[in-house]
Image (cartoon, helix red, strand yellow):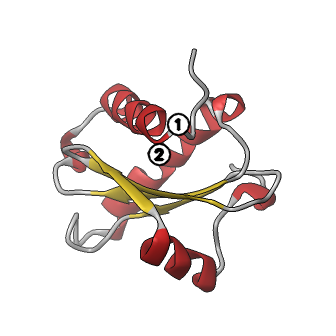
């Protein structure tokens, strides 16, 4: 589980991110990101009802994406707010495919440190 300080929870922060954040998209995932001037990066995952009407499926996707974030946590630069947007088709992807897609989006956005 992500530490509490690294979770993006406040509604005002999420609204500001949607209003003034930059976007990077792929076929099954999207990323909104923005500088936050904090010593940590904060993350949120959004999975809408359009993806699946079943909460079990939506929650599984959230857990998988958070697990990927935890696994690669040391690679992230501090000072970003990031929300991961799940698009249709993500339910059919394996964990490895989701991981590859998410990491490439984080590289494109500059949130992840270059190897």
- x and y, in percent, of residue 80 in the image: 64, 53
Asked if residue 113 is positioned above or below residue 76 in the image, the reply reads above
Q: Secondary structure at mark 1?
A: helix
User: How far apart are the alpha carbons under marks 1 and 2?
Assistant: 5 Å
Left or right of 12, for residue 30: left
Taking the view exactly as shown, the residue that stands out farthest to the top is 115
Specify the farthest residue to the bottom: 12
Identify the residue position indicated by label 2 in the image: 65
From the image, tell me which residue sits under label 1: 68
Residue displayed at 23% across by 72% down = 53
Name the foreground residue: 55 vs 12.
12
> Would residue 112 be found to the left or right of residue 65 on screen?
right
> Which x, y percent locates residue 79?
71, 51
Residue neighbourhood size for the residue with mark 1, other residues' Cα within 10 Å, grouped as few (<14), some (14–19), many (≥20): some
Q: Secondary structure at mark 2?
A: helix
| Image coordinates for residue 47, horizontal then vertical, percent | 36, 65
Q: Quadrant of residue 82?
A: bottom right
For image coordinates 36% across by 59% down, the residue present is 85
Q: Residue at x 67, y 35 (%)?
A: 73
Q: What quarter of the picture does the C terminus occupy?
A: top right
Residue 66 versus residue 75: which sits nearer the camera?
75
For the residues labelled 1 and 2, say whether their Cβ atoms are less than 8 Å apart: yes
Check residue 101 in the rendering and tell me which mark sits there, or answer none. none
* Nearer to the camera, 115 or 74: 115
Instruction: Answer with the quarter of the image where residue 77 lies.
Output: top right
Nearest the camera: 77 or 89?
A: 77
- Tell me the quarter of the picture where residue 114 sits: top right
Q: Is residue 83 above or below residue 49?
A: above
The x and y percentages for residue 19 are 44, 78
Q: How many marks?
A: 2
**Residue density around tag 2, few if under 14, some if 14–19, many if 20 or more, within 10 Å:** many
């Amino acid at each position: 589980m992500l530490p509490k300080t690294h979770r993006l929870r406040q509604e005002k922060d999420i609204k500001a991110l949607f209003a003034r954040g930059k976007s990077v998209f792929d076929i099954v995932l999207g990323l909104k990101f923005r500088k936050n001037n904090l010593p940590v990066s904060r993350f949120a995952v959004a999975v809408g009802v359009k993806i699946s009407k079943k909460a079990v499926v939506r929650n599984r996707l959230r857990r998988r994406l958070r697990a990927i974030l935890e696994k690669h946590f040391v690679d992230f630069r501090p000072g970003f707010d990031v929300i991961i947007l799940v698009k249709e088709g993500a339910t059919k992807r394996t964990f490895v495919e989701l991981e590859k897609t998410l990491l490439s989006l984080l590289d494109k956005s500059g949130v992840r440190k270059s190897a």
